[in-house]
Image: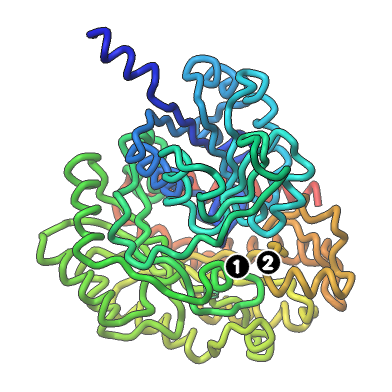
Amino acid sequence: MFQSDMMDKQSQKRVLIINPPSGLYRRDDRCQSRVEDQTVQVVFAPIDLAYLGAMARKAGAMVRIVDYPALGQGLHAIVRDLHEFSPHYLVLNTTTATVRDDLHVCELAKESNPGIVTIGKGEYLTIFSEEVLGQNPLLDVILLGEPEYTLYDIIAGKSLKDVAGILCRSSVDSELPLVFQTTERTFIDNLDTLPFPARDLLDNNLYRSPETGKRLTVIYANRGCPGRCIFCPAGHLSHYRLRLRSPQNIVAEIEECVYHHDIQEFLFHGDTLTMNKRWVIELCQLICEKGLRIHWGCNSRVDTIDDERAEWMKRAGCWVVAFGVESGVQELLQKMKKTTTLEQAREAMRICRRHGLLTHAFYVIGLPWETRNTLKQTFKFARELDTDFFDINIAYPLPGTEFYDIAVREGLLQAEQLHQGSYAHGVVRTYTLSAEDLTRWRKRALLRLSLRPKYILRTLRHAGSLPTVLNYLKAAWRRLRHLLQSDRTA
Ligand code: SF4
């Protein structure tokens, strides 16, 4: 290496972007569930981090992304990486349940290099930014709002007071007040301007389809949701606005995955892929035109699917569609502001079946109005819909949601319990049921739904090939063991 190259390398900023080793979680703002609490225990590629990686690289930095939970590595591995890579910036992803452990990493970072700038992101940090910065003197910056261009500005060396969308400690820039917040970061209007996520910085072998065992990645085709469901932060975090990438831009990213990363399995991870009919059909048509033989799943809403959309989705390689059915009680759907009906849920499942698409229903229990009777009705409805996959999640009071506000206001949540809950272990009681009742009911319902002989036979028949049958059996065993073990500890 020439001396000038070495000089360049030495002067280049180094950025370490991580999922801290605080457990396997889905670390989206909308879904912060423990992986083991889900029926389909899949570890998704951290594409949010890969976007940040791409932006930091665009700003001229040398970047490493490490997903410690997916690697099964702990704090000692972080200490090793901090020492070896010696980053100037550490970017941490957090969830509400793990935030305390996540932020502990700042301590290790400052011990390794007191000058390192520690940067946190996550829904909890956004909502309680001032409190978090006040209580964690070793955290320097919180990214508020959409983080990609904010990180770009920081790494590119813009003065922090001019970087929109941060809450920052002044020790990073001593001429400024102790803690200061900059102007609001506006949303990215044209999502096509973002570079593709830096998948070359991920270990793509870590993220595999639980069905086929092949590499699986996530595509953010759209961002935001106009929905106002009281338990979900997606609406307010996106200011109730749906933004779409162009089908051409999405397909170019898929081609990069197929031809450069050997990935054929995808999850379209937007809050709902099917909301804009013309756009989703155009996307599917383009996938077909390009001759891409890919296999994918997506999220939808029961009121945004019809025969035409389902037909094109199937043609373009879709095999499973996930719906937030939420409840078998119409009155509860209204109270949670889901704005869908039970009949729409029935019809959505009929449409998918007509077109050979498997269905995955998500139910949410434990909102304040839940009773024994409504739980029974939801269970009955789940049996009636008889979807191919299902999850029953206990409503988790994510700060910033209307549910969180109600739970605090009505004394249904003890503040100190917030970080102890999960989608499997309730921390909020309803007006008539305790959190423990909900935890027990969920386990019983999941066991009874999963162990129906007809359901087991149908699932194995769908699997088709022997390797997939074996993967299904492995997944079912993991799931069953987890449910039975947690049954004993409940
Ligand atoms: S429809 Fe409701 S649950 Fe689904 S992403 Fe939008 S706000 Fe969240």
Question: Of 42 and 459, which appears nearest the observer?
Answer: 42
Residue under the image location 81 percent in, 52 percent down: 490
Question: Of 365 and 200, which appears nearest the observer?
Answer: 200
Q: Secondary structure at mark 2?
A: loop
Name the residue that disc number 2 marks.
Answer: 400
Q: Quadrant of residue 10?
A: top left
Residue under the image location 69 percent in, 86 percent down: 335
Residue under the image location 62 percent in, 79 percent down: 327
Where residue 77 sits in the image (x, y, percent)? 56, 21
User: How many numbered tags mark residues here?
Assistant: 2
Q: Quadrant of residue 152?
A: top left
Where residue 65 sits in the image (x, y, percent)? 44, 34
Where residue 485 sits in the image (x, y, percent)? 71, 45
Query: Which scheme is used to colour this image of the protein?
Result: rainbow
> Along the horizontal axis of the image, is 337 left or right of 51?
right
Where residue 446 sits in the image (x, y, percent)? 63, 63
Q: Quadrant of residue 21?
A: top right
Question: Of 136 and 276, which appears nearest the observer?
Answer: 136
- Mark 2 and mark 1 lie on one chain; the one further toward the N terminus is 1
Task: Kindly identify the amino acid type of the residue bearing the numbered disc 2.
Answer: Gly
Task: Kindly identify the amino acid type of the residue bearing the numbered disc 1.
Answer: Pro
Q: Secondary structure at mark 1?
A: loop
In the image, the residue with mark 1 has its CB under 8 Å from the nearest atom of ligand 1: yes
Q: Is residue 465 visible?
A: yes
In the image, the residue with mark 2 has its CB under 8 Å from the nearest atom of ligand 1: no
> How would you rate the neighbour count of disc 2 (Cα within 10 Å): few for under 14, some for 14-19, many for 20 or more?
many
Residue under the image location 87 percent in, 77 percent down: 432
- The answer to whether mark 2 and mark 1 are in CB contact below 8 A is yes
Q: Is residue 45 visible?
A: no
Q: CA distance from mark 2 to mark 1?
A: 6 Å
Compared with 63, 415 (above or below) is below
> Along the horizontal axis of the image, is 372 left or right of 350?
right
